[in-house]
Amino acid sequence: MADIQSTFHKITKGIKKGYEDGVNKFQTSQEVLDLKDRVSQNEAKRLELIATLGENHYLKYRNGEIQDENIEEICSGIAEIDKKIFKDLRTIEEKIKIHDEKIVCECGASLTPDDKFCKNCGKSIKSPDEELIEKTICPHCDEETPLNSKYCNCCGKQIS
């Protein structure tokens, strides 16, 4: 009987040790996951701050407050991307405006922006007033901007 008790005691001791090891491994794994999550959150915050720093530095460079040959190539690349974004946004705006804008002839017939003459009465259609706005070319980015603007719509620099 003593052998059975001794064997039973060894088995329960082994099970208890295995259970404690499992609990310790689980707790360690949970702590590691929590730390990894915290590292990930801090890395995201860091990237956000670096992006803000870079954006502020770029704006200062763009406004002529900083002149640094080391970042000239990067800033030129950003300026080119800014121009592409500006053009695409302008195209989107024009497409939405054309789609939403209803053009009606004096006779009441609906027209499309491409119509040169009314399909109902044959009257010549004049171009929209927007095209009559005088424009100038920005000396900094070579984009069109209204003549009376003090700053370029694309690059934001002052027009002299």
Image: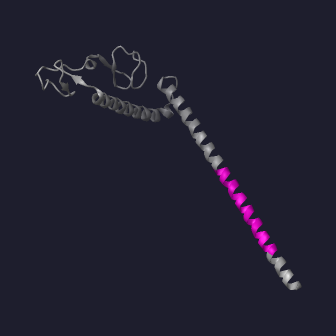
Q: Residue at x 68, y 58 (%)?
A: 29
**Residue in the image at 70% along x and 60% along y:** 26
| Magenta segment | 12-36
Residue 58 appears left or right of 112:
right
- Depth check, front residue: 39 or 117: 117
| Scheme of colours in the image | one colour
The image quarter containing residue 28 is bottom right
Is 37 magenta? The answer is: no
Q: Is residue 88 left or right of residue 8?
A: left
Q: The C terminus is located in which quarter?
A: top left
Q: Most extreme residue toward the right, as rendered?
A: 2
x 43%, y 21%: residue:
157
* Residue 35 lies in the magenta-colored region: yes
Please give left or right for residue 29 compared with residue 83 in the image. right
Of all residues, the one furthest to the front in this rendering is: 108
State whether the magenta stretch is mostly helix, strand or loop.
helix
- Residue toward you, 131 or 50: 131
The correct choice, above or below, for 96 with respect to 126 in the image is below
Query: How far across and how far down the image is residue 72, in percent?
Result: 47, 32
Q: Quadrant of residue 103?
A: top left
Horizontal and vertical percent position of residue 144: 32, 23
| Above or below for 24 versus 112 | below
Quadrant in the rendering for residue 156: top left
Image position, residue 62 (x, y; %):
47, 26
The quarter in which the N terminus is drawn is: bottom right
